[in-house]
């Protein structure tokens, strides 16, 4: 059975079925065009996924950091309060009346008469001055407090 | 039949199109107005809904004694507040709050049912309870930590420290004098909040840490201060005096080691103190006529100007007329020929007036002013007054003042002025500026505080040494109650009458004693002043023993051995 002729070339020599996609002269082959679209779509999807992944990672890290930042700021404030309270309690415990109350039962009493002994070679000529010297204030050490502040500063400035 | 063409259609379309376009334009313009013109304002309004900024109060700088004992500092207490509309179950919430706030649940329940937007449930909630409350995270309940000024040593050195009111304002003493330095700078913490006010930790907020005020280290020694206050209370009790003041100073540099006055108050409970006059520090803000203690100044002037030497004599007839006014000795007796050391030891008014009149007003008052009388001493405390000094040429000055001023009458001084003047005898003739602040400690380290006024030489070192010997003789010979066995001390008693309108009080006196030790290397100078003693009016009887007891304890506390141990040549 002969294939029905649906169209003839103007010269009538070549058979071109009408149902076959026609390629424009010099243009891409249609299925190749579809493959390229598909690749582009896949690339776009991949890129979008990458951006999404990057964005989510970034957002997660930022949120984690901010939560940590909030915790550190709260911890800093709580430590300041606790520190102040402890200083107060220490000062109260060191009050002369409190010390006397505690020292009495342990057998301590204010000296009624002090006796001095000669010690050969003991430096002479600066009696009493030591008692009046103010306690020298040392330069502050980098302690837990400062480390906490530094952590906060680093978080705020983004330095590491 | 075909329909006739509608001639109005294009016109209606045009109108409709124009209207639509116009409407779209209006919408566009309105949108631009809100989005561009009003943008900043709307952003601000929006932020108000979800963005909250909380102030972090700065800690006020602490005040520490010379050995860094805390005298004044901040602790925190919580203020607990509620937003009743956000409290889902007032009854349950009240039950949770009651044990922590120490209040009946019924009362809290009633408060939480109120229609108010926000209410304060409690103030001054202790740190521990506040922390527990925070952990509970009760809906609609908030806590805010607030600094609270406390004085852990109670009434110790109250007049020196002053106090800070509930509104953060500082009054009196070091608190007021160093207020601007101690304040610090508040910080802030901002961020997004949910409708209940809780922080939403998904974006960065703002955080400016509070910069706490620097700590102030003062020259005060808390132990010496406590001993002095104890002795002052005992002195008042034993002498029957109404009030009193004691100052202990290091004469070498003017640093105040102790400064106590009674009656005092507790700065932790300043709001209960009545009358408010108790807040003022009598050591710097009350004048008194110093009486015979002032003869030290007169004698210093006479010796330094070359008018007399310790061996110079005069004939004491028991009376001298100055400016038409008779001046007698304290016992109205005549002592005959006496030298300058005896004049001081027996505290002869006639002798002092003789010296001032021989010096003449110009020289005498020149020295009086050089010793710092009539001006503030420059101490770093709020509320100091300059005293009362009448000078020749002043309308209120009379020629007789030259005679009476010589033995401390008709002149008003503060206890601090008096001790500063006599300290210059102890330190080789230099008038030092009394000082309390030693250093400010900031996070970068300690920063020394310089005295407000430089020291100045008021008498020659030789004069100071000579006078110190004379004062030592005075104690040894006449003021037995001021002595400390084994130690050489120098000092002078004072018994001053109290001026009242129209003359002097016939009964009451101000008894005082001022002395320093050890004489050859003075390390402390003590002024004791007792007002209106009822047991005896004399400084040598009521004030001298107080001086002696304090000096004895200071020798022990400062580790100063007795003379025969200290001065022995090994």
Image (cartoon, coloured by chain):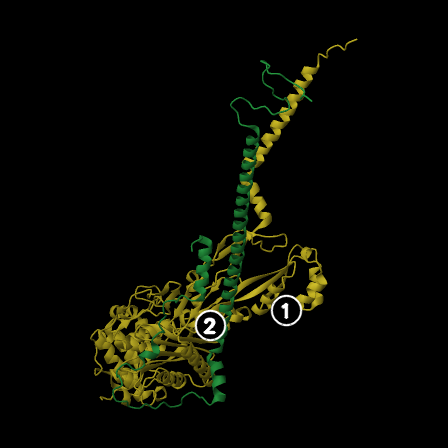
- The 10 Å Cα crowd at callout 1, few under 14, some 14 to 19, many 20 or more, is some
Q: Chain of mark 1?
A: B
Q: Are marks 2 and 1 on the same chain?
A: yes
> Could you say which chain is coloured green in the image?
A
- The 10 Å Cα crowd at callout 2, few under 14, some 14 to 19, many 20 or more, is many
Q: From the viewer's perspective, tell me whether residue B109 is left or right of residue A114.
A: right
| Furthest residue in direction top, as rendered | B1
Image location (x, y in percent) of residue A131: 34, 79
Residue B81 or B566: which is nearer the viewer? B81
Is B512 placed above or below A51 here?
below
The secondary structure type at the circle numbered 1 is helix
Viewport quadrant of the C terminus of chain B: bottom left
The secondary structure type at the circle numbered 2 is helix
> Upstream in the sequence, badge 2 or badge 1?
1
Could you say which quadrant of the image residue B225 lies in?
bottom left
Is B212 placed above or below B206 here?
below
Q: Chain of mark 2?
A: B
The residue singled out by tag 1 in the image is B100
Is B115 placed above or below A132 here?
above
Whether pointer 2 and pointer 1 mark residues with C-beta atoms closer than 8 Å, the reply is: no
- Mark identifier at residue B435: none
| Furthest residue in direction front, as rendered | A1
Q: Is residue B501 visible?
A: no
Image location (x, y in percent) of residue B328: 33, 81
Image location (x, y in percent) of residue B441: 39, 66
> Could you say which chain is coloured yellow in the image?
B
The residue singled out by tag 2 in the image is B158
């Amino acid at each position: 059975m002969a294939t029905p002729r649906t169209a003839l070339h103007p010269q009538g020599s070549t058979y071109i079925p009408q149902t076959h996609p026609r390629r424009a002269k010099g243009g891409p082959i249609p299925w190749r065009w579809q493959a390229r679209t598909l690749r582009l779509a896949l690339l776009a999807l991949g890129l979008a996924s990458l951006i999404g992944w990057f964005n989510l990672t970034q957002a997660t890290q930022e949120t984690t950091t901010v939560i940590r930042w909030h915790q550190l700021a709260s911890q800093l404030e709580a430590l300041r309060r606790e520190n102040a309270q402890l200083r107060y309690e220490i000062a109260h415990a060191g009050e002369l009346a409190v010390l006397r109350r505690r020292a009495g039962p342990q057998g301590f009493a204010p000296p009624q008469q002090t006796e001095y002994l000669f010690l050969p070679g003991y430096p002479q000529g600066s009696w009493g001055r030591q008692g009046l010297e103010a306690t020298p204030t040392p330069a502050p050490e980098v302690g837990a407090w400062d480390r906490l502040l530094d952590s906060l500063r680093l978080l705020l400035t983004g330095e590491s | 039949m075909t329909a006739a063409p509608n001639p109005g259609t294009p016109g209606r379309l045009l109108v409709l199109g124009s209207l639509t376009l116009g409407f779209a334009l209006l919408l566009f313009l309105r949108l631009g107005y809100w989005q561009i013109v009003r943008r900043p304002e709307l952003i601000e309004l929006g932020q108000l809904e979800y963005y909250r900024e909380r102030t972090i109060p700065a800690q006020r700088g602490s005040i520490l004694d010379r050995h860094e004992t805390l005298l004044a500092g901040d602790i925190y207490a919580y203020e607990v507040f509620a937003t009743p509309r956000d409290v889902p179950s007032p009854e349950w919430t009240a039950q949770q709050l009651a044990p922590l706030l120490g209040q009946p649940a019924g009362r809290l329940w009633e408060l939480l049912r109120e229609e108010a937007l926000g209410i304060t449930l409690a103030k001054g909630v202790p740190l521990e309870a506040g922390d527990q409350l925070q952990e509970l995270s009760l809906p609609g309940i908030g806590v805010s930590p607030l600094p609270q000024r406390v004085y852990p040593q109670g009434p110790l050195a109250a007049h020196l420290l002053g106090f800070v009111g509930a509104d953060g304002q500082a009054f009196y003493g070091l608190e007021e004098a160093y207020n601007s330095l101690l304040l610090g700078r508040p910080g802030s913490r901002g961020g997004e909040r949910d409708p209940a006010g809780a922080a939403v930790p998904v974006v960065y907020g703002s955080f400016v840490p509070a910069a706490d005020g620097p700590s102030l280290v003062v020259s005060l020694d808390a132990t010496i201060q406590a001993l002095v206050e104890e002795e002052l209370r005992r002195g008042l009790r034993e002498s029957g005096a109404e009030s009193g003041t004691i100052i202990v100073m290091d004469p070498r540099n003017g640093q105040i080691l102790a400064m106590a006055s009674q009656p005092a108050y507790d700065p932790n409970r300043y709001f209960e103190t009545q009358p408010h006059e108790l807040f003022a520090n009598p050591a710097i803000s009350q004048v008194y006529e110093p009486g015979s203690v002032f003869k030290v100044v007169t004698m210093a002037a006479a010796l330094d100007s070359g008018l007399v030497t310790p061996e110079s004599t005069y004939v004491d007839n028991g009376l001298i007329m100055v400016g038409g006014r008779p001046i007698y000795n304290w016992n109205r007796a005549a002592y005959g020929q006496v030298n300058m050391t005896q004049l001081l030891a027996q505290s002869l008014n006639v002798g002092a007036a003789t010296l001032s009149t021989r010096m003449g007003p110009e020289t005498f008052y020149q020295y009086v002013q050089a010793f710092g009388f009539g001006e503030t001493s420059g101490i770093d405390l709020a509320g100091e007054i300059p005293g009362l000094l009448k000078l020749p040429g002043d309308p209120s000055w009379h020629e007789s003042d030259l005679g009476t001023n010589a033995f401390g009458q008709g002149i008003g001084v503060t206890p601090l002025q008096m001790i500063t003047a006599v300290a210059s005898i102890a330190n080789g003739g230099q008038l030092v500026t009394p000082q309390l602040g030693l250093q400010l400690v900031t996070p970068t380290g300690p920063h020394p505080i310089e005295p407000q006024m430089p020291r100045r030489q008021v008498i020659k070192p030789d004069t100071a040494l000579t006078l110190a010997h004379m004062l030592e003789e005075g104690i040894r010979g006449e003021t037995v109650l001021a002595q400390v066995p084994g130690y050489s001390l120098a000092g002078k008693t004072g018994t001053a009458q109290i001026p009242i309108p129209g003359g002097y009080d016939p009964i009451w006196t101000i008894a005082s004693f001022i002395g320093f030790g050890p004489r050859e290397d003075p390390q402390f100078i003590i002024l004791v002043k007792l007002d209106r003693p009822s047991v005896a009016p004399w400084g040598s009887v009521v004030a001298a023993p107080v001086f002696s007891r304090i000096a004895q304890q200071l020798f022990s506390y400062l580790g100063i051995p007795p003379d025969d141990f200290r001065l022995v040549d090994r």
